[in-house]
Image (cartoon, grey):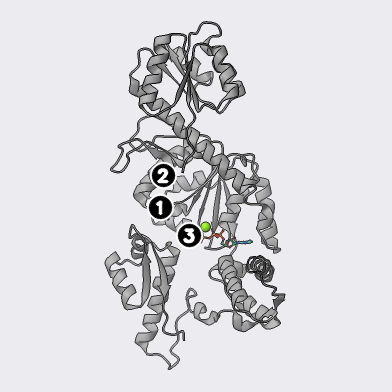
Amino acid sequence: MSAPLPPVLVVDDEKNMRLSLQTLLGDEGYLARAVESAEAALKLLAAEEFFMVITDARLGGMSGYDFLAKVRAQWPDRPVLMITAYATPKLAVEVIKAGAVDYLAKPFAPEELLHAVARCAERYRLLVENAALRARAGEAYPLEAIVGESPKMRELRQLIQTVAPTDARVLILGESGTGKELVAGSLHSLSQRRQASYVRINCAAIPETLLESELFGHERGAFTGAVKQKAGRVEEADGGTIFLDEIADMSRPLQAKLLRFLEDGTFTRVGGTQELRVNVRLIAATNRDIVKAIATDEFREDLFHRLNVVQFRLPPLRERADDVLVLAEHFMKLFNASMNKKITGLTRAARQKLQSHHWPGNVRELRNVIERALILETQREIQPASLPDFSVEARLRKGDLPRATGEESLDEIVANFERDLITQTLEENHFSLTRSAERLKLSRHALRYRMQRLNVAAVTDGDDETTSVITRDPREP
Ligand SMILES: Nc1ncnc2c1ncn2[C@@H]1O[C@H](COP(=O)(O)OP(=O)(O)OP(=O)(O)O)[C@@H](O)[C@H]1O
Ligand SMILES: [Mg+2]
């Protein structure tokens, strides 16, 4: 639900103009107040909320230009649209330089004016939404939320502190569950842009056809379903940070558009012709092997270089064994508090079990393991029995061949392997059937069929693109 839009303030010394503007705006559903002088307008602006100001350049008393300068100084967020009697390119530049969002030369078509007003209305809504979000989020990603005492994690926090205040682009690489989102968030929270918005887009979760319009917006009628003009998320991030998660999943054509955007900060909305410009800092992340994606032509090398100004590589959990217990303690505190439990620690055997595990799902997996253990545990300390049987997961490790133990037939072993592989692929691709099928070089139909046969139940959501998986593994009791 969006908040109601406050009125437009119209300033014109000609009565007929005031009336016709009020009628035009009123017919489109806008509230409009009209005054005849800049002086009166300044008084009203101080007393009431307006989402924009439309002013004539020539007014009796204070001129439209002086008025514009005063509004800019006192209410820098309030867009001003200037109407001039005649337009010259020089004048246009001057008006825009003085801080007007737009200008119109008389006579103008009503649609031109309404178009400019609609843009300002959209901008106002975004400002209000962002302010509300920021108030709720506070310091959303403090550095202390990145837990770990291993030298690599200490270095990482140090690097975040060094890089955050700069405007440098950052590429964050690391396996799934290593904390890429936390790093991206704290880069914003510790930056000079922290008061402005932090916009996060998961490129893998948004259908390819919609990602461009999500990112750069669209004009009304740009495609079926585009019933209204929509600002892009890059506009919402103006002055702030945009985090493009799973960047390696972006399509090649969109990569080209992103490249252009990174080169000069300009973009056009889908179906639009006007070149727009914003000032955003870009942070990108992927858990895929980006070098391989470049080698196979899935990812543009020039885009990689543009993004890769500062690179963060998050080490997998298995390479920082010391952190396993530190993180386990951290999550125990967290879940003790949220579940109202009083588990005091881990038994020595439980600690050993955690430390000998390979953690293919990294910190996310550890977090889930501790959450589960706190639910199951009935004693004061976590017992090994409350931890999962890691041997099942161990079989998923790269290069690990399933073994014939005499308990299962070849067909069963192959089916188990196939089930694990499909489940893992679905997870890695955020449960997108299309992408998973691509990775497995199967048709979607064939993938579905196999999932049914192997008892991988897919909960498909509305657009039939993403699923989540409930596996029923016959090996488990
Ligand atoms: N160093 C850490 N300290 C505390 N919590 C962490 C740390 N690293 C990761 N986590 C937690 O682990 C979970 C996964 O982290 P995150 O979502 O940042 O992973 P990711 O690298 O973005 O993974 P993916 O590639 O799958 O998106 C989150 O709940 C996060 O809070
Ligand atoms: Mg992530």
Q: Position of residue 43 (x, y in %)?
A: 59, 17
> Looking at the image, is mark 3 or mark 2 earlier in the sequence?
2
Task: Give percent across and percent down for residue 222.
Answer: 31, 38
Residue 346 seen from this side: yes
Which mark lies nearer to you, 1 or 3?
A: 1
Element type at mark 1: loop
Residue 354 x, y percent position in the rendering: 63, 76
Classify 127 as above or below 389: above
Q: Nearer the viewer, residue 377 or 17?
A: 17
Q: Is residue 85 visible?
A: no
- Circle 2 SS class: helix
Quarter of the figure with residue 343: bottom right
> Residue shown at 47%/9% (left/top)?
13
What's the mark number on residue 206? 1
Rendered residue at 49%/30% (across/down): 6
Q: Amino acid at mark 2?
A: Glu
Task: Tell me whether the residue at label 3 lies in contact with that at label 2, contact meaning CB atoms closer than 8 angstroms.
Answer: no
The amino acid at mark 3 is Asp
Badge 2 vs badge 1, beta-carbon distance below 8 Å: yes
Mark 2 = which residue? 214
Question: In this rendering, is residue 409 above or below 401?
Answer: below
Residue designated by label 3: 289
Dot 3: element? loop
Going from N to C along the chain, the mark reached first, 1 or 3, is 1
Query: In whole angstroms, how far apart are the C-alphas of marks 2 and 1?
Result: 9 Å
**Residue 32 position in % (x across, y down):** 45, 23
